[in-house]
Image: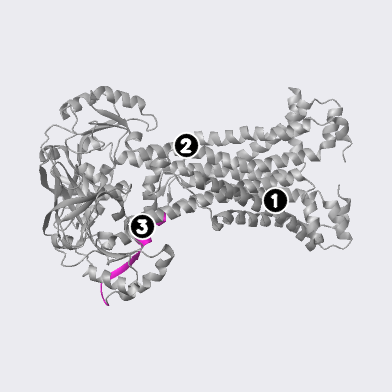
Amino acid sequence: MNIVLRLAWRNLWRHPRRTWLTAGAMVFSNVLLVFMISLQFGMYGLMIDNTLQAFTGHLQVQAAGYKDDLKMRQVVPHAASLAAALRAELELTTIAARGAAFALASSEDRSYGLQIFGVEPEFEPGVSNIPGLVKQGRYLQEGSAAEIVIGAVLARNLRVSVGDELTLLGSGRDGSFAAAVVIVVGIFDSGVPDLDRSIAEMPLGYFQDVFYMDGAGHQVVITTPDLSQVAVVRPQVERLLPQDSPLVVHDWDVLQPGLKQAIQADLSGAFFMYGVLVILVAFSVLNTQLMSVLERTREFGIVMSLGLTPGRLGRLVLLETALMGLIGLLLGALLGGLLTLWFTYHGFAYPGMEEMATNFNLPARFYPQPSIFSLFLGPAVVFVFTLLSALYPALRLHWLEPVAAMRAA
Amino acid sequence: MQMLHIISTLAWRNLWRNHRRTVIMIAAVSVGVWAMIFMTALMRGMVNDMVRDGIQSLPGHVQVHHPGFRDDPGINKLLPQTDQDIIDGFATGGFRAWASRIKVPAVVSSERESRGVTLFGIDPERERAITFVADSIVAGRLLENVADTGVVIGQKLADVLDTELGKRIVLMSQDPQNDIADRGFRIVGIFDAKLESYEETMVFAAKETVQKMLRVPNRVNEVVVLGDDYRDVSRLRNRVAELSGPDVEVLPWDEVDGYLGTMLSVMDGFVLVWMIVIFLALSFGLVNTLVMAVFERVREIGLMLALGMRPANILAQIIVESLLLLVIGLLIGNTLAWASIAPLAGGIDISAVAEGMEMFGASSVLHPELIARDVVSANVVVIVLGFFASLSPAWRASRYEPMEAISKV
């Protein structure tokens, strides 16, 4: 073993209690950081996936301006054939066209306003998990049958069940009166009250007839194999759009701006807290290392008068700190990982989480996912700050006068 | 008494023997206390704004409904008393403000578009003190009286409906016999709410006009009452229950809006956890400092013991030393917190993440709120836990064997 390393290691254990207390501060912070970061990033991932998979998809082709105004006349012409062309060109089956309209749905007892989507029954399961969540009856079948699938909350409010009729009243693409009588063939239950209360789906062909869409739709939804593919697929889609058309491609973070911002807001709050923890640890280390340098003034004076340069001594102090930091890093990552792992199996919940979770499309009990990133991000930052805070004690050595130091009390 | 004086003088002087160490530790305590109070004020501010806006936008402090209203909020869940009886009865209640309303789901249509909304039939005079809408009119006027034939809608809804002040819209809902009830209204006012979702989904018309339209003369389905403090509503609830008779459901706001209520209690728990976490991170450094302080003085402590100072006094001296250090840190930390929060009283603009905050139900201006109770608990946490953390090093110092301690190198 290298002599400097051996010296540093021995120096570290001259005051085992002090070393352990300082390393303890690191371990404490690291365990918290590992756990919180695993929890957070796992939660963000779930939030994004749950929200996008439910309905939005990763990319959408829309008429420019439709996203903000949602007006019937801002259409994607020949939506179904555009979707078919994109499927063929991109060799991706998870692409589907939709039309959207608002209407008053009336059963025998009740009337509610809702958003109706015309979907391609064959391809919709690729871009949305609603088709898979039909709990009663069946999902739509191909063609242009006068059928509708509605959410569980809406079904309860309207007091309808599978097989009942609904009357729809709304306005068509040109603003004229649109009406239809449809049969409820399925009821889905997504667990997201907003979706279950306000959304219904019918076949795109029939939707286009009822709302005078003339073959047009309002959005072509694209789900890429995973989130990181969005940036790759987007330019391909843009290239395939008809020249000079008013169509635009939107990313998920534009379609669901709340999602990304909620994550950012939460992150900035969390990083403030993490920052405070790290600074407190840094103070602890600064204190310890400053003490350990000061109490060795005489010793340092002697070795310096024997010819050791202040630079080498400074490196010795930094090495001691690094060793201590390494103990904190490894123990912290290990214990933090174990804690996270325990919650991975048993789930994590706190009182009140259930009510909060539904607001963000999250389950009530949460299973954090440890990863290399979440395991080492926090501890690595703590380690860096540990070293930074030892700089002052290490640099002080340059001002040390060997003779005066040897005589120090 | 004199003993106490000696002990505290000794403790104070000892504190400054190694001024670097003490200054670093005080800095750490100050930063920790500042972070406790500052972060808490931010979170309190956010939740308070949410609750205040939430209460203003809808529930009041206490609501009265038909028992089946919450599950199926429609027009056939009317309150058993007539509106006139309710008005006469509640007038004797001495409440800060109250109002009876009709609240039903409806579909609103312009010439071009239709949307699902919630229609409120209100008494504009009474609502002035309760809902946000009276203060949020940006164009036109609020309804003038209970028989006004105009309607007030949100800016966002006006945009999506492609309509404007002075134009007509049609509202469609149903009467208690489940027949469609509709009526044309002229838009007399546009409001601008803090949350975009309110602007898009809330439509206000005069109470008697809505009663006529829905064919429910002199009946209402909601009474809201405002008390003096949203944190204490149980007495208010009982008073309202007395007035509103049998066969109704009287609920305080935190049960009407479970999310807001939960948010408030989760926040209480979180504030305490946050303070304790910060303290624990601090405590490693605190114990470390004391351990070192004792270690350096072993001979001196031995000498004092040998000269007849009682172990209890040694114990007290170390604890006083630790408390003095904490108190100085607390003073600086509290001052820092106050100094950093005071300039922010006007609110911090976080509109960059406005839509994300809307997912939390919060608005885009954050008003930090310094609550005396939180400041007190931060200080109590530090002092009380600090006392316990110093017990162990102090105890060890008082248990030294005088002879051994004196002869220690």
Q: Quadrant of residue B351?
A: bottom left
- Which label is found at residue A52? 3
Question: Is disc 3 on the same chain as disc 1?
Answer: yes
Picture coordinates of residue A73, whole percent (x, y): 19, 64
- From the image, tell me which residue sits under label 1: A286
Q: State the image quarter where residue A247 is shown.
A: bottom left
Residue A268 placement, left or right of A90: right
Name the residue beneath numbered marker 2.
Answer: B268
Contact (Cβ within 8 Å) of mark 2 with mark 1: no
Say what secondary structure mark 3 lies in: helix
Q: Specify whether residue B347 is painted magenta.
A: no
Residue B311 percent coordinates (x, y) = 78, 27
Instruction: Say if residue A23 shows up in the picture.
Output: yes
Q: Chain of mark 1?
A: A
Relative height, residue A84 to residue B110 (above, below): below
Tell me the SS state at disc 2: helix
* Circles 2, 3 touching at the beta carbon (< 8 Å): no
Asked if residue A260 lies in the magenta stretch, the reply is yes
Q: CA distance from mark 2 to mark 3?
A: 32 Å
Q: Which residues are magenta?
A: A243-261
Residue lying farthest bottom?
A: A243
The amino acid on which the numbered mark 3 sits, given as a three-letter code, is: Leu
Q: Amino acid at mark 1?
A: Leu
1 or 3: mark nearer the eye: 3
Q: Earlier in the sequence, mark 1 or mark 3?
A: 3
CA–CA distance in space, label 1 to label 3: 47 Å
Local SS, label 1: helix
**Residue A160 tag number:** none
- In the image, what residue occupies the spot 41% across and 40% down? B263
Assign the N terminus of chain A to one quadrant of the image.
Answer: bottom right
Q: Is residue B392 above or below residue A100?
A: above
